[in-house]
Image: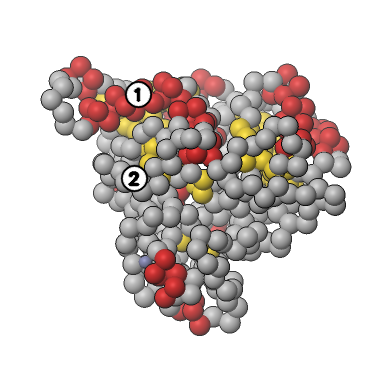
Amino acid sequence: MAMACGRVAPLLPCPVRPLHRLPSVSPFFCSSSSSSSSSSSFSLPRIFPIRPASRTAGIVACRRGPDQEPDAGRGDDFVVVSFYKFVVIENPQTDVARHLAFLQGRDIHGRIYVNEQGINAQYSGPNEDALAYADWVKEDQRFSDVLVQVSAASHGHAFPRLKLRYKPSLVQLEGGVSHLPLVDPSMRAYPLTPSDWRKRLQSMNNVSRPTSESDEQVSDRKCLLLDVRNGYEWDVGHFQGAQRPNVDCFRSTSFGLSEQEVASSDPLAGIDKAHTDILMYCTGGIRCDVYSTILRQKGFRNLYTLSGGVSNYLKNEGSAEWVGNLFVFDGRLSLPPSTYKPGANTNATARPNMVHENNTFARCYICGSELLEFRHRNCANLDCNQLFLSCSSCVTQLSGCCCLHCTSAPRLRPVLPGPQRYQKWHMYRDGE
Ligand SMILES: [Zn+2]
Ligand SMILES: [Zn+2]
């Protein structure tokens, strides 16, 4: 049985196949144990719906599709911004107060966390407010070099409200991350520019695909392209030739913090730590910084990461070597590469040439058929609300539910036609 990150399978299994994909608020969240409100591993984790965000009076959200370019000149275009930096902060509470003061009267929703190890921010807002905050943060010398990533919001705010506070761990990981030497860049993976990353991948993938070329000189350097995201993120898009552990949640692998998991599902098990290049990637870079520090402590020497993550890559290199969409942890759920680089091939129906054997890429979680739309939906049963990938026929047959059992639940939402989702409802519950 597939490991489910300390989670249990749904209490009542689906008629065809059990669902294991349960994303939660943070990329690191995969289990109910990560939420302090439900420490029992037997409580069924859910993505709770959140009340529609109240928009600040006088500000009208620009109803722009995700494939349209943000208009820098318009203040009412909503954007989603993210940045993070691991750096020593002497008095984080003072910083929190300063940031809160700056955001007074500005229409910013999102999650902004500060502590002694730095800052981690994902938020949405009207272009003007959102960028003003990022600019203000960068005026601080400690953050002057942060990579601020901006993408178009599709329907106003992508987050339900603002949470700006001190948080003991900037990222959710069992046991926390405060003990990790995250502020020491030499402990983290070496960042590769998107362009260098593309070249490495193209070289790797060309070698892996048997061609008439001699692959002697390249293959004497072993490489492992490692996706450190979670299963449900992989399922809507990933790099060609990448591997990921055969567990839903990356941190359940044997080289993460949970040592008890079996090594057979671990792509890093048994590899030569001194002579293998590990190329790791995640959505925005922060998970790689954390995991590479852990791997460094475990003796892995040659660690590389994609600077700024996939979102930065898609913006700079388009969809080269990438297949599918990018899963994002806000109300938008999934973005085609063209969101980041207009004109980039959306590659929507391309399928990977090489797949890891646990690949579930773009398959209906219910019937297993191939999907054309790489975007999750929430179960129509409010009290289940599980995020899952589904084909249109299963959506129709199960009325938008994840399984037969949910179709008879008391609190059912009507299914919206076509690609529409429950707007504002499928934002993840913020873990308290
Ligand atoms: Zn199906
Ligand atoms: Zn359900």
Q: Quadrant of residue 364?
A: bottom left
What kind of residue is marked 1? Arg
| Quarter of the rendering containing residue 202 | top left
| Horizontal side, residue 363 vs residue 310: left or right | left
The answer to whether one can see residue 12 in this image is no
What type is the residue that disc 2 sits on?
Ala
x, y (%) of residue 20? 42, 61
Question: For the image shown, how many numbered marks are present on the structure?
Answer: 2
Question: For mark 2, does the 10 Å Cα neighbourhood hold few (<14), some (14 to 19), or many (20 or more) residues?
Answer: few
Does the numbered disc 2 mark a residue whose Cβ is under 8 Å from ligand 1?
no
Front-most of residues 169 and 400: 400
Taking 17 as reference, is 376 above or below it? above
Residue 7 in the image: above or below residue 109: below
Which residue carries the number 2 mark? 350
Residue sitting at x 49%, y 71%: 400
Residue 200, labelled with which disc? 1
Residue sitting at x 47%, y 54%: 375
The reply, left or right, for residue 349 in relation to residue 233 is left
Q: Is residue 394 visible?
A: yes
Left or right placement of residue 247 versus residue 406 in this view:
left
